[in-house]
Amino acid sequence: MKTIAIAAMGAMLALAAPVWAADRAPVAALTDADNNAIRVVKVGDTVTVTLTTASDGGYRWVAAPAPGVVMVGEPEAKRPNLTPPMVGGMGTTVFTFRMTAPGTHVVRLTESRPWEKNAKPVKTFQFTMKTASPVPVRKPRSR
């Protein structure tokens, strides 16, 4: 009976781990200057990517799916703070990704206009995450 209870608690903690990971601060913050960057992280770590965009021109950044990486929520578009309020200017789009499996994962993002189906992206951005398994926490032996 004790074994079943311990196994059940372990399963509950494993399911809750992604929720805890989403609450942690990102371990890496990438920007336009980090195109083709390689970072070493652990499973459960989050990474933010902030890219400039001309959103008033209809351009949008889109992330391609990558095994071992999930996007947390939706990308957050931030418009430029122009005074007085004006049309134009460069804004940013912020993506948050969580690493879900060990391995080397390449994440690609492209900027284009969604309605231009056959047009090449105006910009591309990619980064590589070398993701290690989290180090298990060892409990001291009781005597």
Image (spheres, rainbow, N blue to C red):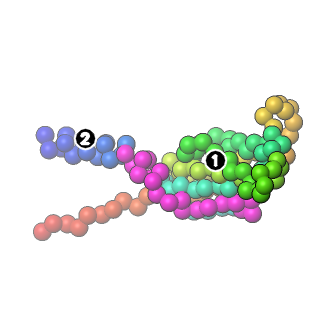
112 drawn magenta = no
Q: Residue furthest right?
A: 119
Q: Which residues are magenta?
A: 16-34
Q: Position of residue 23 (x, y in %)?
A: 45, 53
Q: Is residue 83 above or below residue 6?
A: below
Q: Position of residue 66 (x, y in %)?
A: 62, 43
Q: Quadrant of the C terminus?
A: bottom left
Q: Position of residue 80 (x, y in %)?
A: 74, 54
Left-right relation of 20 to 104: left
Which residue shows up at 31% across the image and 42% down it?
11
Q: Which sits in the foreground, 60 or 124?
A: 60
Query: Which corner quadrant of the image does residue 30 belong to?
Result: bottom right
Q: Are marks 2 and 1 in contact (CB under 8 Å)?
A: no
Q: Secondary structure at mark 2?
A: helix
Q: Of discs 2 and 1, which sits in the foreground? A: 1
Disc 2 crowd rating (10 Å Cα; few below 14, some 14-19, many 20+) is few
Q: Amino acid at mark 2?
A: Ala
Q: Which residue is disc 2 drawn over?
A: 8
Q: Quadrant of the N terminus?
A: top left
Q: Is residue 64 above or below residue 81?
A: above
Confirm whether residue 136 shows in the render. Answer: yes
